[in-house]
Amino acid sequence: MIKANPGDPLLLGNYAKFLKDVRGDLAKAEEYCGRAILASPSDANMLSMYADILWEYRRDGQLAESYFDQAIKVAPEN
């Protein structure tokens, strides 16, 4: 489905979540989550998941925090 809809943020995000949670493939999850964010930069859930991946995979607290901050800015009610 992603090949047919390569810019669909919902598909990209769901696949990133699958890769992270089911397959444990954080490298691929980071790639697909990043693509989802490019397709929909105001998706707080994707920004938050990307931050989580950055922390788990890269142990980059500073970069992860910046994505968590972006998620809060776009959806402060969450």
Image: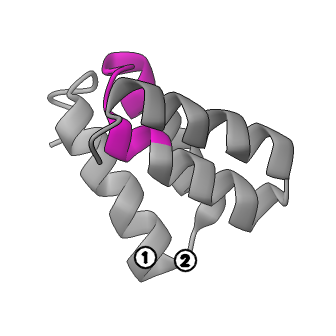
Residue range highlighted in magenta: 36-47
Please state the horizontal and vertical placement of residue 48, each as a whole percent of the image.
47, 48
Residue carrying label 2 = 24
Q: Nearer the viewer, residue 53 or 5?
A: 53
Query: For the stretch drawn in magenta, what is the main secondary structure?
Result: helix
Q: Residue at x 70, y 52 (%)?
A: 54
Quarter of image, res 74: top left
Q: Residue at x 31, y 41 (%)?
A: 12
The disc placed on residue 43 is: none
Q: Is residue 3 magenta?
A: no
User: What is the C-alpha distance between the residues marked 1 and 2?
Assistant: 6 Å
The residue positioned farthest toward the front in the image shown: 77
Please state the horizontal and vertical placement of residue 19, each as a whole percent of the image.
44, 66
The answer to whether mark 1 and mark 2 are in CB contact below 8 A is yes
Q: Amino acid at mark 2?
A: Gly
Quarter of image, res 53: bottom right
Left or right: residue 26 versus residue 2 is right
Q: Is 52 rendered above or below residue 30?
A: below
Q: Residues within 10 Å of mark 2 (few under 14, many from 20)?
A: few
Q: Amino acid at mark 1?
A: Asp
Please state the horizontal and vertical placement of residue 34, each as a whole percent of the image.
52, 33
Left or right: residue 54 versus residue 5 is right
